[in-house]
């Protein structure tokens, strides 16, 4: 399985995002609620003696949520906190996505924050890093 497909399947198991019908790739649908997964161009590589590599790749996970009312904004904070907690719990349980390589960790590089807003909705962003061993196919 590819890394992006594995991550998408893994995020779909998060019960907190059941209101999202599909997590898009490299774009965020204009209607809320929506989610999108964006791969970042940087990769950290640590070469090992046997020729394999420990790689860390970073992804942005964006959520578009309604935010007209104060109650919606409070709900968004709570919603995103539960997603954050789910990611953390998966790391503790070592419940990693199947990306075709042995995964060593999946971490939140930073907490969620509001990236942008319109009159009716706001885009919130998480930064998630996945560390895996390349050179050894599962």
Image: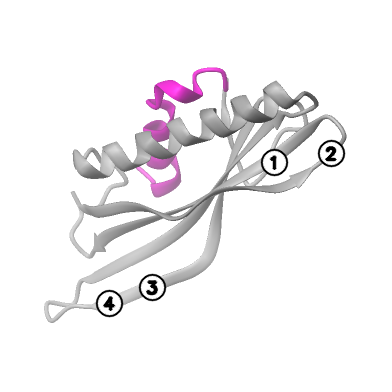
Alpha-carbon span between mark 4 and mark 2 = 41 Å
Which residue is the site of mark 3? Answer: 44
Alpha-carbon span between mark 4 and mark 3 = 7 Å
Alpha-carbon span between mark 3 and mark 2 = 34 Å
65 drawn magenta: no
The mark found on residue 118 in the picture is 2
Quadrant holding the N terminus: top left
Which residue is the site of mark 1? Answer: 123
**Foreground mark, 3 or 2?**
2
Tag 2's secondary structure?
Answer: loop
**Foreground mark, 3 or 1?**
1
Alpha-carbon span between mark 3 and mark 1 = 27 Å
Is 90 rendered above or below residue 120?
below
Which residue is the site of mark 4? Answer: 46
Is 108 rendered above or below residue 49?
above
For the residues bearing labels 4 and 2, Cβ distance under 8 angstroms: no
Of pointers 4 and 2, the one earlier in the residue sequence: 4
Residue at the image point whose x is 57% and y is 34% from the top: 77
Residue at the image point whose x is 54% and y is 61% from the top: 40
Q: Position of residue 69 (x, y in %)?
A: 77, 23
**Residues packed near mark 3 inside 10 Å, few (<14), some (14 to 19) or many (20 plus):** few
Q: Which residues are magenta?
A: 1-20
Q: Residue 44: which quarter of the image?
A: bottom left
Of pointers 1 and 4, the one earlier in the residue sequence: 4
Of pointers 2 and 1, the one earlier in the residue sequence: 2
Of pointers 3 and 2, the one earlier in the residue sequence: 3
């Amino acid at each position: 399985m590819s890394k992006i497909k594995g991550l998408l399947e893994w995020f779909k198991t998060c019960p907190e995002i059941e209101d999202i019908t599909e997590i898009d790739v490299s774009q965020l649908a204009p209607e809320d609620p929506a989610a999108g997964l964006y791969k970042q161009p940087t990769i950290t590589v640590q070469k090992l003696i046997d020729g394999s590599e420990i790689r860390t790749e970073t992804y942005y996970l964006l959520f578009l949520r309604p935010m007209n009312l104060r109650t919606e904004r409070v709900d968004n904070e709570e919603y995103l906190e539960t997603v954050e907690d789910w990611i953390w719990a998966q790391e503790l349980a070592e419940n990693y996505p199947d990306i075709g390589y042995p995964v060593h960790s999946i971490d939140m590089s930073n907490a969620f924050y509001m990236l942008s807003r319109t009159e009716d909705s706001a885009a919130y962003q998480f930064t998630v890093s996945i560390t895996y061993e390349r050179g050894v196919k599962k």
